[in-house]
Image (cartoon, rainbow, N blue to C red):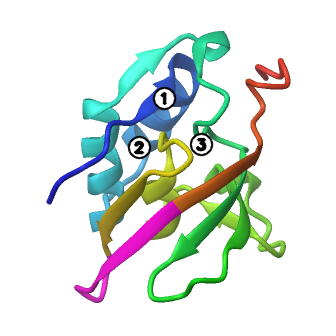
């Protein structure tokens, strides 16, 4: 499977690695997320390109076969409240889009064995772009 390059901030990387280390058992999605973090280009938060999906970013994505974009916000598990549009980074679609830039697509394995194809249409909000490094 050909994977697009991804960019992750040092802060997101550290938080995600810490969270994964504290899981008693890793799901297949968590293992894929670990693999993604291991291959990511890691940059300082202020150096994250403005068109890249970071944690807490609000993004327009398209999941094939749909052609209608969906607006989602990528959140950490402890911030996940089930609000409309919230996607946990430990969910397949959440883990898939982290670090992707606008226009990039990725094929991502789902728990049922199918492959999901996700495209980043637009990064509507990105904390780093707004100077919010919390």
Alpha carbon separation for disc pair 3 and 2? 19 Å
Of helix, strand and loop, which one carries label 1?
strand
Q: Is residue 115 magenta?
A: yes
| Mark 2: few/some/many CA within 10 Å (<14, 14-19, 20+) | some
Q: In the image, residue 116 lies at what x, y percent? A: 36, 77
Q: How far apart are marks 3 and 1 (CA)?
A: 8 Å
Disc 3: which residue: 53
On the question of residue 91 being in view, the answer is no
- Residue that badge 2 annotates: 20
Callout count: 3
Q: Do the residues labelled 2 and 1 touch (CB within 8 Å)?
A: no
Quadrant housing residue 40: top left
On screen, residue 48 above or below 5: above
24 sits to left or right of 67: left
Q: What element carries label 2?
A: helix
Q: What element carries label 3?
A: loop
In this figure, which residue is indicated by the disc labeled 1?
Answer: 8
78 vs 132, nearest the viewer: 132
First to last magenta residue range: 110-119
Mark nearer the N terminus (3 vs 2): 2
Label 2 or label 1, whichever lies nearer to me, is 1
Tell me where residue 50 appears, x and y as whole percent.
67, 28
The first of marks 2 and 1 along the sequence is 1
Q: Distance between the residues labelled 2 and 1?
A: 16 Å
Q: Specify whether residue 7 is in view.
A: yes
């Amino acid at each position: 499977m050909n994977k697009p390059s991804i960019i992750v901030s040092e802060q997101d990387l550290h938080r995600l690695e810490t969270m994964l280390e504290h899981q008693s058992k890793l799901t297949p999605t968590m293992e894929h997320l670990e693999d993604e973090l291991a291959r990511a280009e890691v940059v300082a938060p202020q150096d994250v390109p403005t068109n890249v999906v970071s944690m807490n970013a609000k993004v327009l994505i398209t999941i094939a076969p749909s052609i209608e974009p969906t607006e989602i916000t990528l959140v950490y598990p402890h911030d996940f409240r089930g609000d409309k549009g919230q996607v946990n980074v430990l969910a397949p679609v959440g883990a898939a889009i982290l670090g992707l830039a606008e226009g990039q697509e990725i094929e991502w394995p789902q728990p049922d064995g199918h492959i999901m194809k996700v495209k980043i249409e637009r990064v509507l909000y990105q904390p780093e772009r707004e100077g919010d490094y919390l």
